[in-house]
């Protein structure tokens, strides 16, 4: 199993839980030296020596290609967990793409696409996309996803990227089902991690917050539990399928917007992403 961002936040707990259950886990990390320190601790904690680290910078498509080219053998689960949130200033990749969209979604899209053969080899592989309740704040901005005309807003950029993560799972569910690959997206909940470093910390009321272990639980369910065997193209939170909501809740942010599960949107995003990858080569 592969966990992107598996050396930080809920990624660490996801890695720990999967390793404790006996899985061979690869932590894909932007800072492999720091990730190796975490991996050493997790090997002791899980009593599983088969936790390794490989470098991966999702904002750099060359790094994604290197990861894919260096991979051999089947993959039972790919947990697209890594992410950044609410960058206060507009940042772009070398290709000129908005950084949150590029890191949270497009890098994962390229990674998943590149590992398709290895996922198919596993026969019943699972791709897990870590989305967010933040997706309730906005859809994909089809005409200007990289904020070349729309005034940049940190939360809108984050919302778009997380909606795209959910649509990735919907696209996989419809396009790769014949290869035995399933995919689902999830909202891990409100967990205090370094993800909120640009927002002044987690602002969710205490009684609605989760621990790191609770935040990782839905990822682990979707990656490994027989309870969701064959389930695909859905959105989960609190270890259960989430309801589709018609407007953003005013109190507790829960549920999934219909635009994030729309199959037409999923196909449109897939096609747009293929064009972006072609332009980045």
Image: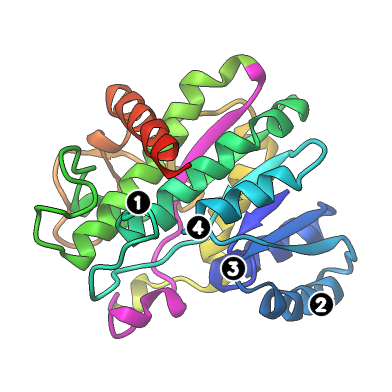
Stretch in magenta: 179-204
Residue 131 seen in render: no
Examine the rendered structure and indicate whether residue 209 appears above or below residue 145. Answer: below
- The front one of 4 and 142 is 142
Examine the rendered structure and indicate whether residue 265 appears above or below residue 240. Answer: above
- Residue 30, numbered label: 3
- Residue 162, numbered label: 1
Which element is circle 1 on? helix
Which residue has dot 4 on it?
60
Q: CA distance from mark 3 to mark 2?
A: 17 Å
Which element is circle 3 on? loop
Q: Quadrant of residue 77?
A: top right
* Residue 178 at x, y percent in the picture: 61, 14
Among numbered discs 3 and 1, the one appearing first in the sequence = 3
Report whether 215 appears left or right of 17. left
Q: Are marks 4 and 2 in contact (CB under 8 Å)?
A: no
Report whether 181 appears left or right of 253. right
* Residue 236 at x, y percent in the picture: 44, 44
Among numbered discs 3 and 4, the one appearing first in the sequence = 3
- Which callout, 4 or 1, points to the residue nearer the camera? 4
For image coordinates 15% across by 63% down, the residue present is 152
For image coordinates 59% across by 56% down, the residue present is 63
Which residue has dot 2 on it?
40
* Residue 93 at x, y percent in the picture: 38, 60
């Amino acid at each position: 199993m592969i966990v992107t961002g598996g050396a930080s936040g809920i990624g660490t707990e996801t890695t720990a839980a999967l390793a404790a259950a006996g899985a061979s886990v690869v932590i894909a990390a932007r800072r492999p030296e720091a990730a190796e320190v975490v991996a050493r601790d997790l090997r002791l904690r899980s009593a599983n020596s088969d936790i390794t680290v490989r470098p991966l910078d999702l904002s750099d498509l060359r790094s994604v290609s290197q990861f894919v080219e260096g991979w051999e053998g089947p993959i039972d689960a790919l947990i697209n967990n890594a992410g950044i949130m609410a960058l206060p200033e507009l940042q772009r990749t070398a290709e000129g793409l908005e950084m949150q969209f590029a890191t949270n979604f497009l890098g994962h899209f390229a990674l998943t696409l590149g590992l398709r053969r290895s996922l198919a080899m596993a026969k019943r592989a699972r791709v897990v996309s870590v989305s967010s309740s933040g997706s309730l704040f906005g859809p994909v901005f089809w005409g200007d996803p990289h904020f070349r005309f729309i005034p940049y807003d940190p939360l809108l950029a984050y919302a778009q990227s997380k909606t795209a993560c959910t649509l990735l799972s919907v696209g996989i569910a419809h396009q790769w089902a014949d290869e035995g690959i399933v995919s689902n997206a999830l909202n891990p909940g409100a967990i205090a991690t370094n993800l909120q470093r640009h927002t002044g910390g987690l602002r969710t009321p205490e009684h609605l917050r989760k621990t790191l272990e609770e935040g990782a639980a839905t990822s682990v369910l979707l990656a490994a539990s027989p309870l969701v065997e064959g389930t695909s193209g859905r959105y989960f939170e609190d270890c259960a399928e989430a309801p589709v909501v018609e407007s953003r809740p005013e109190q507790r942010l829960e549920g999934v917007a219909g635009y994030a599960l729309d199959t037409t949107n999923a196909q449109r995003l897939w096609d747009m992403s293929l064009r972006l990858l072609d332009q980045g080569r």
